[in-house]
Image: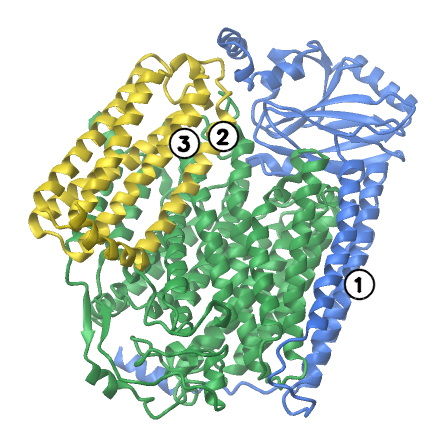
Chain colours: A yellow, B blue, C green
Amino acid sequence: MTDVKNTVAPALEDESQKPSIFGFWLYLMTDTVLFASLFATFIVLRGRTAGGVSGEEIFSLPYVFIETLILLISSFVAGLALFTARARRKALTISLLLVTGLLGLAFLAMEIHEFRTLVTEGHGWGTSAFLSSYFTLVGTHGLHILIGLIWLGVSIMFILQRGFTDRFLTRLTMWSMFWHFLDVIWIGIFTIVYLVGIV
Amino acid sequence: MKWVLKRLSQIQIPRIPIVPRVVVLLAWLLGLCLIAFVLWFAMHGQTVDVLQTRGEIGNRQRDLLVFASLLAVVVLMPVYIMLFVFAWRYKEGHHRKYTPKWDGNKRYETIWWSVPILIVSVLAVITWVTSHSLDPYKPLASDKKPLQVQVIALDWKWLFIYPEYQIASVNELQIPVNRPVEFTITSDAPMNSFWIPQLGGQIYAMSGMQTKLHLIADEPGEYRGMSANISGEGFADMHFKTYAESQTDFNQWIDKVHGYENTRDLDMSSYSHLAEPGTSVVQYYHLQDQQLFYNVMMKYMGHSIGREQTSEMTNMEYSN
Amino acid sequence: MEFFANLLGRMDLSYFWHGWVQFGAQLTLIGAVVLVIGLLTYFKKWKWLWREWLTTQDAKRIGVMYIIVAVGMLLRGASDALMLRLQQALASGNSEGFISSDHFQQIFTAHGTIMIFFVAMGLMFGLINLVLPLMIGSRDVAFPTLNSTSFYLFLAGVVLTNLSLIYGEFGSAGWLAYPPLSELAYSPGPGIDYWLWSIQIAGVGSLLSGINFLVTILKHRAKGMTLMKMPVFVWSVLGAMILVVFAFPILTGTLFMLSLDRSMGMHFFTSDFGGNPMMYINLIWAWGHPEVYILILPAFGLFGEVVATFSRKRLFGYKSMVWALMAITVLSYTVWLHHFFTMGAGGNVNAFFGIMTMIIAVPTGVKVFNWLFTMYRGKISFASPMWWFMAFVATFALGGATGVLLSIPAIDFQVHNSLFLVAHFHNVIVGGVVFGYFAGLTYWFPKIFGFRLHERLGKAAVTLWTSGFLLAFIPLYILGLLGATRRLDHYDPSLGWQPLFIVSGIGALLIGLGIVVQLAQVVYSIWKRRQLRDTTGDPWDGRTLEWSVPSPAPHYNFARLPIVSTRDAWYEAKHGGNQVFSGEYKDIELPRNTGFGVYVGILSVLFGFGFIWHLWWLVLLSSVALIYVIIRRTYDENITYVIPAADVERLDTRKAAI
């Protein structure tokens, strides 16, 4: 591991100076602003249940807590994968990425399950402003996860076909930034939507 | 095609004439005078609603507008003078002092940072004070009890309800002079804006909630009122007349409305008929349902009432 | 059968026919498209178009395409304006004018949307693309492919907007489509969706451009060009792009929510089920107010360049200018509520936003005085960009003053939603943004095309625009005071508004004539391009780096990258200061052409079209195709080509120059 660290550290510094990485930071910032407007709308509309259910009645904290754990672990594994990729260790990287992807899929499946349950119980997005904003905020995050998973799949294919090119490593760095970013957004959702919604 | 291109290239384009600077300047001055004259002529004899106000709120808003405009003129004058004087003096070939490397002066810059700050500070104080003193929600000081008028913006007409007098009117507002009027405003349509310029400024009418506006008329007269915010196809016809009159005339009008044979009853059922999209002539109603205004408002406020009640209300709406 | 009916969503033949006036517009539009296609085919120019233009990664060419599209849309927006003016001049009393209420409402919605999103934004991004890389001594923007993609997203918005004219209808709820009027309950047709998806897609393009130019400015400057040595135009673009990056995501989010309301039956902004229309109005102006400054800041910046150049003098108070720009950037986020004082938020809130608004007048005023003192003790040559500047200060100052009036809530209650307000914002946008960009176009035209625009026709255009502007909008100020609200398609004759509307219509005609003269100016200049040729590369005795390269600028911008040690680096170099070009020639690596942007643009049009007409299969297909195109691009390794150093040296006609 120390070996890896020594070779990687200077490359990392270079990387952060790259315009594309800087640009990607800016992109993440714009995405943050997008989520901020969704969060703001959710906070304004959370009480407007139009006689329908409120957050306390439908959210299950343990369930969401498991989702959160899964996403956090996947983020951790993604970080490891980036290190091994920089060390150009193909098999290890692919397996770590696969683990990340499976965890991401599990998260997505849990979220879809939660949505399905809500809809079948008659609490669809058209029931109230609160549910509209809930489905949209959480769903937009889910959509991002889906995009991240597609991106991940493409990355695995790319490693198998072309190996670690410089441009690919830059893209993988971006992907891992994206994945961590989604983690941060999810912490926001977990706190503002679920924790505050229940407590 | 080749032929056309060839022909085209043979066309002689006329030379564009050079107009002397003095002629241009004179043309501008003449033009400006002409515009001023035409505008004066076009305005002649018209009521300038925002300036010829007939109520305390409107008057104070007008005074503020005039004061701020004068202040603006004072600020603009030096800009215009400098613009044209500098342009003339320092035109190439006029051989004035030329300092190509002079790119700053602390003293000058301090002046034009601080003078605007000073002016804006004055304006800020005025803004703070008038935003509160002319807050449309603020009741007017008067020894008389304000007249309550509930206003509902409909597609595309105005319904005025006088709960004290058990009447309602469409597209006609009658108020006594020198008595404050408290408008409580909502909408059963897209967002509108309730505005009677000669009495004072406007406020939005929004469904599911109420806004307030306090106005008073100082002089008897007929004042135009309208919706100032687009609300759909018939929006341009969404205006009404406001009649300000003495208390006696006002009382007579109330009696007239009560006795008038075309006056119909206003309850939720006739209301929903009235609320259908379309423009309307002046109509009068006997108010049968004191809660009508609140019911109209509440039907959008599902979030504060139970689901059962909402459905009851919806049923009521559709049963008609 | 039902299956096929579902495939067509809510499409219906009846959406083709709306009446004779629209039929004329449809014919004109289709005719224009057919004409362009015909000419391209006749002259066998398709390949040339694809290779040289559509797939180009050169920022300058992308800039030119932005400007061509924007000018095309200016023609449409201006025709809309003339129709509005004609209707209001006619429709008094019994006369209903020549168009219906609904059509009138579509026209003003289209006019506003087109002028802001597709004319002003198009000209802005066009100008930035043309000169920003040159000004900072860079060969290109940071991400050329992203740049071309942004352009095609912008174009996709343009295409959708114009498609609504041929098939369907456009929004009729005003250019910001306030709910609940823009919700399904009150606007069930496809019009609002056309509006929504046009600007949603174009908005994403703008957002990406914002990121691109921000990185370009911060990471791609010439050696030695510290932030405080950047030309003031670059500063203004920096401010504008910071605004883009923070404001446009709000637009994206807001439109996203409105589209969910409309297509998924959600209740964000509906009147019932707990929806909150006021939330939309807050959000849209939290984007909308910065948007105004996004448009005006680059105009401010380029006037800084124009005044300094034509006064042959350093820009007065550079530091003040930079501080003022940054102050405006920050403050523009704190004023959005002044667009709806009349919602009744209460004295404290209204006063706060009113005061914040008038504070913006301070840095703006400082800028005006600095411009004036740049002229003071200068040697001013009145070329047409300087004429635009004079017209700008003369009109913009008035607009600024009425803006301060409007910022006082108690006054706003009396003039909000009236024609006074309409006159005010046209006053700042025409006088500021439009005049500014025209100045910029005239100023930088020779750098891109190698010849100047004809001077006297340019000055005739300034005269027509300015006098037309005064004639068109002073009556609107007066009409506002007469109590005329905006967006009226007819009014009572006893109000006596008709003469003023007629005067205003004449003004609009003069502006239209100004546009015609400008088109004539371009054609005439192309005709006379030999006489107007710019052989020096520096026709105005310029100050900044773009004038250091030949005209037209080579596609690689600089044969050798400049090294900068002062402000106005090129001017100083000409007058005995440090040289900007020195050292060895090096290989130049440039991006290869790619059709990536074109594909993304086409797929975005299909995606939007699917949403508008509820063709869900099309939405799905185009999304999948979009993902495929993007993945394909990541596999493309051969994305650059190299011009060898020897060739660069041979091509460099300015070797002997400073």
Give the quadrant of residue B146. Answer: top right
Residue where numbered disc 1 is placed: B74
Residue A130 placement (x, y as % from top left): 45, 22
Image coordinates for residue C406, horizontal then vertical, percent: 70, 49
Q: CA distance from mark 3 to mark 1?
A: 52 Å
Residue type (three-letter) at the residue carrying disc 3: Gly
Tell me the subunit letter for badge 3.
A
Q: In this rendering, which labeled residue sits more in front, label 2 or label 3?
A: 3
Q: Nearer the viewer, residue C68 or A114?
A: A114
Amino acid found under the numbered disc labelled 2: Phe
Residue C269: mark: 2
Residue positioned most to the front: A2
Secondary structure under tag 3 reads: helix
Seen from the viewer's position, the closer of residues C226 and C307 is C226
Q: Residue at x 47, y 54 (%)?
A: C242
Left or right: where C110 falls relative to B186: left
Residue type indicated by callout 1: Val
